[in-house]
Image: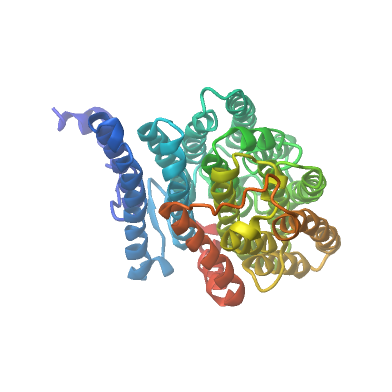
């Protein structure tokens, strides 16, 4: 029966070459999703915790093929491309996949006790979490408009359900509805932009589009509109202003581990897609995307900081902080098309994403630990924290200081990288962006210091100074994120090597 299929397809039919070694991380994740589903069907309610253990092990196992692919050395010479170059495994994709898998593992550690004690459906939760991570891993290798869109929807659709996971909570329901409605709208805008680019280039392959839409030396109106719509679509995923309106309510309404996942993983996935677009799809269209990115960066960091100053809820404050941090990550992309700034811009974005992931996940881990005792998300509930939880106070201070960019923590090196990238551009776009970013750095420090003051100087609001019991999984998450935040700042050479490995220059010509 199967031998008839090639004859039906014609004599020119060629079976696609599948590199199973290169696809191993995706295959492990897909198998893990099926395993969690099956185990959840047969274990008792008292043993549902095993699904979190399986999810964590699956994420760790998926990193093993990344190590073997990286150590073979052949990726330094040529990428492992499949499906006519539409799915590529190179150094860039490897480091991005490693980032997503690490984020997923830390989020599992954050979720273990929170989901179990909250009475949520555990098996389904980890299936959705792994599915979203699978979409992110696929995004790192996507080199075609269709594969980019499929990866984006695979990571987004489970996220809509995770946002509304607290089914009996009106805020969680509101979070899920807002995220879903605005997410679908953004996807439709982005898909329309992609269709315009396909119509202009007669190809869905990113590098083919990049070569054809600028072949005449001048962009047509339809090409310009397509680029703008694509950036707008991904602007939603990175919560760039004015496409950020979903973020504060969604972050506050979703379970805190899910909020941590959104603030780091979804943002990193959006920036991964933007990187692919800027460097592969429209690298020569600087007249279109450079001013647009510049405006987005300025609005995102400025409005995010100003709104964060007014917040009294720690999760909403971190939500607006996440918006502001997205503005800093956008800075290098606003000058990526400038001669001499392309490589440094890419490295700056990649380094910032890694450091921000470690720091922000750590901050949310402390919030989860403290809220287990206080049952409150108010910033005032952190009052007097040093008196009964000095370890958590020190860790939260480290994470907040890193987000503010205070040496010698990782955040200072991340901000140093983006400032250096825009200054390397050597033009008015870069210099003006650096000045605005410096002002915003000072503004951001104010609301981070406000939380530090509550922890170190204010009394406990209810006089309860009983020590906080931190579960083992949460301790592991705090240890991982705390160590990485400090090490990246003290020994920045480690993370700078990561940035060098993620250079996309070798992929531009494919």
Residue at 49% in and 52% down: 469
What is the x, y in percent for residue 266? 56, 44
In the rendered view, tell whether residue 86 sits above or below residue 418: above
Residue at 58% in and 24% down: 173
In the rendered view, tell whether residue 178 sits above or below residue 415: above
Residue at 74% in and 49% down: 293
* 97 with respect to 445 (left or right): left
- Can residue 484 be seen by looking at this rendering? yes
In the rendered view, tell whether residue 436 sits above or below residue 251: below
Figure disc tally: 0
In the rendered view, tell whether residue 483 sits above or below residue 440: below
What is the x, y in percent for residue 428? 86, 62
Depth check, front residue: 104 or 5:
104
Q: Quadrant of residue 35?
A: top left
Depth check, front residue: 172 or 329:
172
What is the x, y in percent for residue 76? 43, 69
Q: Quadrant of residue 341?
A: bottom right
What is the x, y in percent for residue 280? 58, 52
Residue at 85% in and 58% down: 436
């Amino acid at each position: 029966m199967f031998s008839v299929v090639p004859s039906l397809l014609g004599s020119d039919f060629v079976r696609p070459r599948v590199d199973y070694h290169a696809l191993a991380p995706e295959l492990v994740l897909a198998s893990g999703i099926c395993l969690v589903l099956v185990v959840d069907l047969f274990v008792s309610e008292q043993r549902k915790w095993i699904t979190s253990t399986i999810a964590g092990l699956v994420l760790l196992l998926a990193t093993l093929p990344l190590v073997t692919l990286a150590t073979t050395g052949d990726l330094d010479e040529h990428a492992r491309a499949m499906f006519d170059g539409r799915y590529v495994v190179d150094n860039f994709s490897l480091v991005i996949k490693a980032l997503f898998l690490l984020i997923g593992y830390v989020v599992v550690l954050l979720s273990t006790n929170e989901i179990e004690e909250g009475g949520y459906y555990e098996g389904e939760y980890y299936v959705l979490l792994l599915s979203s991570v699978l979409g992110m891993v696929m995004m790192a290798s996507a080199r075609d408009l269709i594969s980019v869109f499929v990866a984006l929807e695979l990571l987004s659709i489970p996220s809509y359900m995770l946002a509304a996971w607290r089914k009996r909570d009106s805020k969680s329901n509101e979070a899920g509805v807002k995220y879903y409605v605005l997410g679908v709208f953004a996807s439709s805008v982005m898909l329309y932009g992609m269709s315009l680019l396909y119509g202009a280039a007669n190809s869905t392959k990113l590098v083919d589009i990049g070569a054809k839409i600028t072949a005449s030396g001048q962009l047509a109106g339809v090409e310009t509109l397509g680029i703008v719509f694509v950036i707008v679509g991904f602007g939603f995923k990175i919560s760039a202003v004015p496409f950020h309106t979903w973020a504060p309510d969604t972050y506050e309404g979703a379970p805190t581990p899910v909020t941590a996942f959104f603030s780091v993983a979804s943002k990193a996935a959006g920036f991964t897609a933007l990187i692919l677009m800027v460097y592969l799809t429209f690298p020569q269209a600087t007249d279109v995307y450079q001013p647009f990115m510049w405006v987005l960066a300025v609005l995102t960091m400025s409005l995010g900081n100003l709104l964060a100053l007014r917040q009294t809820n720690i999760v909403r404050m971190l939500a607006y902080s996440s918006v502001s941090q997205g503005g800093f990550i956008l800075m290098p992309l606003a000058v990526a098309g400038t001669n001499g700034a392309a490589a440094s811009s890419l490295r700056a974005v990649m380094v910032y994403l890694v450091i921000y992931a470690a720091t922000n996940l750590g901050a949310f881990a402390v919030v989860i630990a403290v809220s287990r005792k206080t049952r409150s998300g108010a910033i005032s509930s952190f009052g007097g924290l040093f008196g009964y939880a000095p370890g958590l106070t020190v860790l939260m201070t480290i994470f907040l200081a890193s987000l503010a960019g205070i040496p010698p923590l990782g955040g200072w090196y991340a901000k140093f990288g983006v400032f250096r990238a825009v200054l390397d551009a050597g033009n008015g776009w870069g210099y003006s962006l650096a000045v605005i970013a410096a002002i915003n750095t000072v503004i951001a420090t104010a609301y981070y210091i406000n939380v530090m003051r509550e922890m170190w100087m204010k009394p406990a609001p209810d006089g309860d100074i009983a020590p906080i019991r931190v579960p083992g999984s949460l301790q592991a998450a705090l240890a991982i994120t705390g160590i990485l935040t400090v090490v990246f700042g003290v020994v920045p050479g480690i993370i700078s090597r990561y940035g060098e490995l993620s250079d996309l220059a070798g992929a531009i010509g494919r």
